[in-house]
Image (cartoon, rainbow, N blue to C red):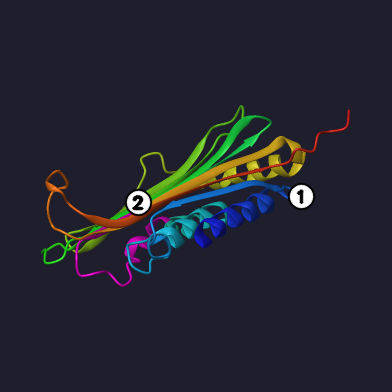
Amino acid sequence: MAIASNFTSSVHKVVMDISSNRDLPLEEFHFDTGGSVFVAAADGDKYISTNPGVLRLIKTLLTAENEDQIDKALEDDFTAVAAKLPKGDCGGGCGAGFQVYLKGELVLTCGGGGGGGYTSGHEKALERGGGGGASIFIPGDESAHVGGGHGLANGTVESKHDADHDATLFLDKLQKLRDLLSEAHTSDICVLGGGGGGGGETKILRLRSQGEKTEGCGYGFGFHICSMIKRSR
């Protein structure tokens, strides 16, 4: 639950920072998990985990001051986190994101995710990949997007940008979005977000249709940042 709470609180802080609205409350946060090994799967103690990298990527995209910071964040090999892998096969992954609405209109989407799998005794034992991005939609203006991903292929990590990736345009629109949100009343801003993931270890190396047995778990969370304060008429 700690990583989900950290993601939510970080999004809360970033939105308050870019909007200059310090009174935006976190109205709702819910968390659900299944399985008895949740902590291991979520915190990377046993299975492949990418949560910290997803959080770092999203925070960087929305606080970047230049194109190099955006490119570096998108090229970061955050799915390399795979601590204490068991002897058997295992896999896991996660994703998280959020949307910002201004007066009911979608103005920002941002998210990321990743995952991987480990096959013991295999030549290409570890496979993994991830990525993320953000898009800005200012009413009456040109939209902007940055995004990309990375993956482990043939022993090397390869990364690439999305086809519509434009860091220069994105930074320009991000500043305009900050100005719009800063001028807006708190009650006009709403943020919806969430995420989820899971991990598991194969106990018997057989197809699921043949009775494969696994040990693992999954989790999900959601949040709602908004003010119910109404403007005085």
Instruction: Answer with mark 1 or mark 2, whichever residue precedes in sequence.
Output: 1
Q: Is residue 142 left or right of residue 200?
A: right
Q: Position of residue 36 (x, y in %)?
A: 39, 60
What label sits on residue 149 in the rendered view?
2
Please provide the residue range marked out in magenta: 74-93
Position of residue 158 relative to residue 207, above or below, is below
* Picture residue at 56% right of the left edge, 52% below the top: 62
Rendered image quadrant of residue 78: bottom left
Q: Which structural element holds mark 2?
A: strand
- Give the SS element for disc 1: loop
Q: Amino acid at mark 1?
A: Asp
Residue at 19% x, 64% y: name it: 155
Q: CA distance from mark 1 to mark 2?
A: 34 Å
Return the residue nearer the eye: 97 or 37: 37
Q: Front-most of 76 and 168?
A: 76
User: Percent position (x, y) of residue 133?
Assistant: 45, 46
Q: Observer-nearest residue: 97 or 157?
A: 97
- Does residue 95 appear anywhere in the picture? no
Return the residue at label 1: 23
